Amino acid sequence: MDRDLWQTVGLVTTWQIAASICYYAVFAAGPFFRDAFGLSRFGVGLTVTALTLGYAVCLIPVGALTDRYGERVTLTGGLVGLAAGMVLVASASGYTSLLIAVGLLGAVYSTAMPGTNKAVYDTIPASRLNTAMGIKQVGITGGSGLSALLVTGLAGYFVWQAGFLVAAVIGIVVAVAFYTLYRTTQERTAEYPDLRALTSNRSYVLLALSGLFLGAALFTTTGYTILYVEESIGGSIAFGGVVLAIVQLFGSGGRVLSGWLADRLPGDPHKRIGGILLVQTLASGVLFLVVARTSTPRSAGFAFAVLGFFVLGFTGVYYSYMTTLVSPGAVGSATAGCQLTLNAGALVAPPVFGLLVDTADYRAGWSFLAVTCLLAAILVAAVIRTPPPRAVTA
């Protein structure tokens, strides 16, 4: 990639880091929500549900608007909205107002995946698309890891709200920089995308359905890592924050490496990229069973790091695979559909996980996530066996 293209990838990745710091701060703040509002593990899970519900409700319309008006406007407005949402969460006076605030935060985060995917797809050559997508996806894990350190670290010196307020400032600064510096050579789409064509695309629908189970695994992992380390392993909240940051770091490595492999390995892109996603899904299922049997801080840290490489490392390839199944003009809306199913898994799985832990133990919860990965793997294998529509060129 030439210098201008690298600058575009860097700018979009920076946007994604700032947005993810805001969004994933809610996952890192689980122990503080529990203490501040007297919540059970099930109640903590409901905050994740409210966050992803707001995200899910707005994805399809925001994806269509991104295809229609372009990513520069939607991404800038989204980051300003995220900064405002962080202030609302920090000022929540009760559990109800907290749920409303995190729901609004999730709603404006819906600009992230349609906008950033469209930015990469519109500007990066096909020979480097998967690598660029993996780098861009590092912004999610990188931002999430930074949010874990930010929220848990500042809480030790100030109050738990401090990390949220700092994240809001970061969001405003990056939003101004993005609006000023981002340029695209693509013209805006004249019409809204054909959503009916997406729903009649069998290979796309199967991939989107696999996202239901992949999202359950991903978001539940990030939502309960710190609580698990504190309650089951006996580590401090600060140590749990470090473990979550390590999970995100290894997830970043997984995204970059899988994207690089998707560009470099020989063979048909449909089967090559699908095969990488299948391996990541099956490995995640096995590693959830390993995590369930950890009993010391050292073993937990190691197991979570390897788990993060796979379960947080799949999203770059997931969206790269999606682009082999749909037409270029529908990338924003197709992204919204896939992200919607990822979020649907996050709506249900975290409370179920918390309920299993409340009524049984953490081993039951992690085993539940292993089953969701197995179901996702079955669907991914079906996508690999289903050729994309003739009109789509991988």
Image (tube, grey):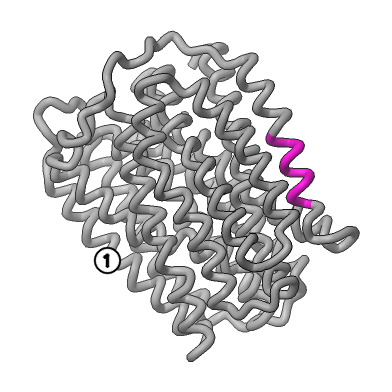
State yes or no: residue 264 in magenta: no
Q: Tell me the quarter of the picture where residue 229 sits.
A: bottom right
User: Who is closer to the viewer here, 276 or 330?
Assistant: 330
- Badge 1, how many Cα within 10 Å: few under 14, some, many 20+? some
Is residue 163 at all visible to an observer of this figure?
yes
What stretch of residues is rendered in magenta? 163-171
Mark count: 1
**Residue in view at x 66 percent, y 56 percent:** 245
**Residue in view at x 12 percent, y 46 percent:** 386
Q: List x then y, in percent, for residue 378.
A: 22, 62
State yes or no: residue 165 in magenta: yes
- SS class of the residue under badge 1? helix
Is residue 299 at all visible to an observer of this figure?
no
Q: List x then y, in percent, for residue 20.
A: 60, 44
| Most common SS among magenta residues | helix
Q: What residue type is labelled 1?
A: Leu
Q: List x then y, in percent, for residue 393.
A: 19, 25
Q: Is residue 154 left or right of residue 178?
A: right
Q: Relative to 54, say whether 66 is above or below.
A: above
The residue wearing badge 1 is 375
Q: List x then y, in percent, for residue 111.
A: 48, 36
